Amino acid sequence: MSQTVKELHNQRKKLWNASIASHKKYIDPENGLFKPQFLESRNCPVCGTNDYIVLFAKEGGQYVKCLSCSMVYINPVFTDEALNDYYGKNHSVQAELVEDGDPFYEKLYNSGLDSIERYSPKGSILDIGCSSGIFLNIAREREWTTYGVELNVGEYSIASKRGHIVYNELLDKITFEAQFNAVTLWDVFEHIKDGGFYLNMMKKLLFKKGIIFLQIPSSDALAARILQEKCNMFDGLEHVNLYGVSTIRRLADKCGLKILDIRTVIPEIGVINNYLNYEDPYQGSIDNKTDIPNLINENELNERLMGYKLQVVLGGMK
Ligand SMILES: [Zn+2]
């Protein structure tokens, strides 16, 4: 079913409100921040230093920016125990938004596969956090052999029924029957506290010339930098690590991976235009989604890697 961007934002708002309501039990009403018993402090997840400025708090969680490498991350962050409790009771917002045949996501998925196929022969592909398997359906149409990992039981069972080989377990608990040409994470990597640990784990699942594909929200996005805490990218709890162009490069480097391809998608110009017109960025009335008048258009914005999401292809292992 196709839907307009505004409907998508309306739907997102409903799910957002439900998700924020579930933050409540963790929040101290005195100061509006998460209660300390759910939290732990951490060093920068990219460069390991502990020197940062506080950006803002959003829905209970505090975002900081590393003064050494510019990484944006939640600190203090939920403990693993509190995160497991939270995810056990809350459905991912993203998963509900992606419908079969939705042209918005189909275009993103196909553009990702275009990048992947430039660097890897078609073979086996593993989608981590595959939800109900919509991306895997598209990959299979393009002649990939499809595997997935999905922790949510309902989505796992839909993806399995669609004929993909899907695992309903944590990545480090699975013994895979195959090695992979490509491992993909769509809107998943920003939820992972220790990205370096995961990149190293994924490397081991790949053939020597295999690649890792990430789609992640970008802290370099013009929408994020203009809207700041009003931007949906900042949810205070789930999006624990917000990489930009230089920080994803630095993390890849640390893990012995090269960036083979990096681009941005979703310019979010309509959202910016609403905000610049003093309206609610996500509910406003401006129809122009292709250029910010007298400033920049969507192509220029993506050329400068300032779109809302980064699509990154990592590989080049020795
Ligand atoms: Zn840092």
Image: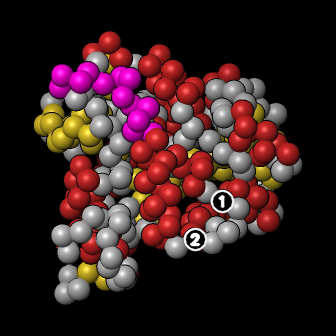
Q: Position of residue 167 (x, y in %)?
A: 75, 33
Callout 2: SS? loop
Front-most of residues 127 and 271: 271
- Which mark, residue 99? 1
What residue appears at the point 78 percent right and 45 percent down from the top-left corner?
158
Which of the marked residues, 2 or 1, is nearer the chain's N terminus? 2
- Which quadrant of the figure contains the N terminus? bottom right
Kindly check if marks 2 and 1 are in contact, taking CB atoms under 8 A apart as contact.
Answer: yes
- Which mark, residue 3? 2
Location of residue 214 with respect to 254 vertically, above or below: below
- Whether residue 24 appears in magenta in the rendering, the answer is yes
Instruction: Find residue 54 and report its image quarter.
Output: top left
The magenta span reads 19-31
Instruction: Say which amino acid is labelled 1.
Output: Glu
Instruction: Say which amino acid is labelled 2.
Output: Gln
Instruction: Find residue 223 and report its image quarter.
Output: bottom left
Q: Residues within 10 Å of mark 1 (few under 14, many from 20)?
A: some
- Within 8 Å: ligand 1 and the Cβ of disc 2? no
What residue appears at the point 23 percent right and 86 percent down from the top-left corner?
293
Location of residue 91 with respect to 110 vertically, above or below: above
Q: Position of residue 155 (x, y in %)?
A: 71, 41
Location of residue 83 with respect to 17 vertically, above or below: above
